[in-house]
Amino acid sequence: MRKLIHDCDNTMGVEGCEIDDGLAILYLLGKPDIELLGITSIYGNSDVETVYSNTQAMMKEIGKGHIPVTKGSSGKKDRGGEAARYIVDTVRLNEGAISILATGPLTNLYAAYLLDESLFEKVQQIVLMGGITKPLIINGMELAELNFSCDPEATECVLRNGKNVSVITGHTCLDAFFSEQEFRERLASSKSPLSGYMLKKCSSWFGQMAKKFNIAGFYNWDVAAAVYLAEPSLFKDSAYRFEPDINNLKRGLLTSSDTMTVPSCKINIPKILDTNALIEEVYHAWLG
């Protein structure tokens, strides 16, 4: 079993808020070789109180209330919270055998690092969803980066000090598009006990996407990162060297400042090899 902490801003089912963190949790729970040790909540898609209570409720509703959910930082100036301590303690208990998936702002990971600066040396792998390398355009509309930019200091710390870091950028996730028609049809025809739950929690999001971007579906940002962690063979790894720059990270931009010539940071930015294979993998984990 591969052990995992998922740090996220899950708002699946909250009116007007993103659904992909919750879908990533359901994907991970559908993988028999992944042991989700705990979920740490973070601000982002909503305030941390909403994220925390929504995630607690979700885990109880799907029969997984035994998996601990801890409350994290309320904003980038909050370097405390029980989530940071949970991350440090859990990594120590599973040193060298645990991965971290972070699909929201990185404040909890930074706070955990401040508690134990050897933390990232003890982690097997860190997979992040966030960042852009150029403007992110959907149907002619530029979309602001909403994870790394929330706490650029935390992002800089994790990228610079993390070991074996993979970043699933917004551009990578543009290949992880899930159409509304297929989503509804596959869930409606499934006998999985989760299918009705997912339809209920996700249905309103399609209207949000149609209204904002004029698209009939959604980009499965955080699920793409979860799939990379669980099934890396569906991606092609690509080494990327740069010098993290706070001003650029305020926009979530993973490029060096023009004044910097020697990159000191190496991360992996994977690319999806086959979109159809990724989509099939996700539906299989969701619905069995």
Image (spheres, rainbow, N blue to C red):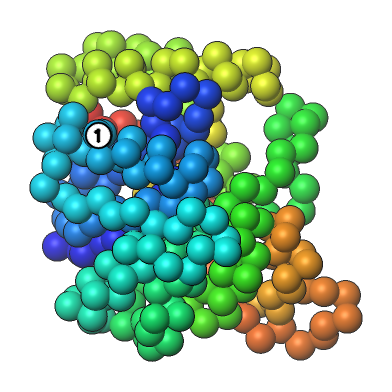
Residue 287, how many percent across, how many down? Answer: 22, 28
In the depicted structure, whether residue 180 falls above or below residue 273? above
Nearer to the camera, 61 or 165: 61
The amino acid pointed to by label 1 is Ala
For the view shown, which residue lies furthest in the right direction?
A: 259
In the depicted structure, whether residue 224 falls above or below residue 249? above
In the depicted structure, whether residue 19 falls above or below residue 4? above
Dividing the picture into quadrants, the one containing residue 122 is: bottom left
Residue at the disc numbered 1: 57
Dividing the picture into quadrants, the one containing residue 213 is: top right
Residue 242, how many percent across, how many down? Answer: 69, 76
Q: Residues within 10 Å of mark 1 (few under 14, many from 20)?
A: some
| In the image: residue 64, left or right of residue 26 | left
Element class at badge 1? helix
Please tell me how many numbered marks the rendered image carries: 1
Can residue 7 be seen from the camera position used here? no
Q: Who's the residue at 71% across and 44% down the image?
A: 144
The quadrant of the image that shows the N terminus is bottom left
The quadrant of the image that shows the C terminus is top left
